[in-house]
């Protein structure tokens, strides 16, 4: 077995059992070293591919596909909406005011579900392990103070809730992620105590000068999460 054939065999199939290959490995320390290195690389490659598949992977993929399909159906806004927005910008009108002139404000539940669906691809695996101190820093703007019993907080930050600054928090629920929005009452959204679509469901209530909106997947027991929030967040009312 010549050098070129040996090196090719050692790299491609280091466990080759042919007499010529075994004899070559036994006769040379450098050949033996090359085979050992190739075997170590193969094992490293196999270990890197041995990834545990989550039990709910199929459900998550199907949910992501459903969200993507629905997002494609939304399409592009009519040209006259874009023109109206441009005119509003030029004359200095705010977006909420323009929306109020054109059409009634949407329900807070529909906006919440749309927000969750649009950001699902970014938040599905988020886990920032937010501390209670971090939660309270953000929550203070809305008059709330949380306790340690709130549970595992995967994400907390401010967000644009249909043009209104709101608090966006993601907690670990019993079945999956639960999203909580804290939206100022004066944002003018139509109230909706309970709401749902084919993928998500939610509940909301007004507390002081804010609306607390809770959204989860269809099998998530949201009333339990609501009870946990009521028990572990004190509001300045």
Image (spheres, helix red, strand yellow):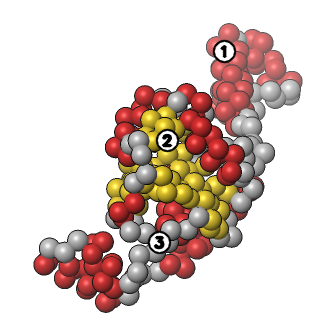
Asked if the residues shown at circle 1 and circle 3 are in contact, with their CB atoms under 8 angstroms apart, the answer is no
Query: Is the N terminus in the top left, top right, bottom left or bottom right quadrant?
Result: top right
Instruction: State whether residue 2 is above or below residue 144.
Output: above
Identify the residue under disc 1: 33
Identify the residue under disc 2: 155
Q: Give the alpha-carbon distance from disc 2 to disc 3, as whole Å.
A: 26 Å
Let me know if residue 181 appears in the view: no
Q: Crowdedness of circle 1 by 10 Å Cα count: few (<14), some, many (20+)? A: few
Q: Give the alpha-carbon distance from disc 2 to disc 1, as whole Å.
A: 49 Å
Mark 2 and mark 3 lie on one chain; the one further toward the N terminus is 2
Mark 2 and mark 1 lie on one chain; the one further toward the N terminus is 1
As drawn, the residue found furthest toward the left would be 91
Q: Residue at x 76, y 19 (%)?
A: 24
Q: Which of 50 and 35 is in front in this view?
A: 50
SS class, disc 1: helix
Q: In which quarter of the image is residue 11?
A: top right
Q: Residue 14: x percent and y percent?
A: 75, 27
Q: Which of 118 and 41 is in front in this view?
A: 118
Q: Residue 215: x percent and y percent?
A: 59, 56
Identify the residue under disc 3: 190
Q: Which of 232 and 178 is in front in this view?
A: 232
Left or right of 204? Residue 57 is right
Q: Residue 210: x percent and y percent?
A: 42, 54
Q: Which residue is drawn at 70% across and 12% down?
A: 28
Q: Residue 200: x percent and y percent?
A: 65, 63
């Amino acid at each position: 077995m010549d050098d070129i054939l040996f090196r090719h065999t050692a790299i491609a199939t280091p466990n080759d059992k042919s007499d010529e290959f075994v004899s070559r490995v036994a006769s040379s320390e450098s050949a033996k070293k090359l085979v050992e290195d190739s075997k170590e690389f193969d094992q490293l490659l196999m270990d890197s591919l041995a990834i545990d598949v989550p039990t709910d992977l199929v459900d998550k993929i199907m949910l992501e596909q459903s969200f993507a399909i629905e997002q494609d159906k939304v399409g592009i806004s009519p040209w006259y909406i874009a023109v109206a927005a441009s005119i509003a910008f030029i004359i200095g009108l705010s977006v909420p005011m323009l929306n109020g002139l054109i059409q009634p404000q949407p329900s807070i539940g529909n906006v919440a579900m749309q927000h969750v669906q649009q950001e699902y691809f970014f938040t599905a695996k988020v886990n920032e392990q937010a501390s209670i101190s971090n939660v309270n820093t953000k929550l203070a703007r809305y008059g709330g103070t949380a306790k340690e019993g709130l549970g595992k907080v995967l994400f907390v930050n401010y967000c644009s809730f249909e043009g209104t600054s709101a608090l966006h928090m993601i907690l670990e629920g019993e079945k999956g992620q639960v999203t909580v929005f804290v939206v100022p009452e004066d944002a003018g959204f139509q109230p909706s105590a309970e709401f749902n679509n084919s993928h998500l469901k939610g509940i909301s209530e007004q507390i002081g000068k804010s609306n607390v909106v809770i959204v989860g997947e269809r099998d998530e027991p949201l009333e339990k999460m609501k009870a946990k929030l009521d028990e572990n967040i004190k509001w300045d009312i």
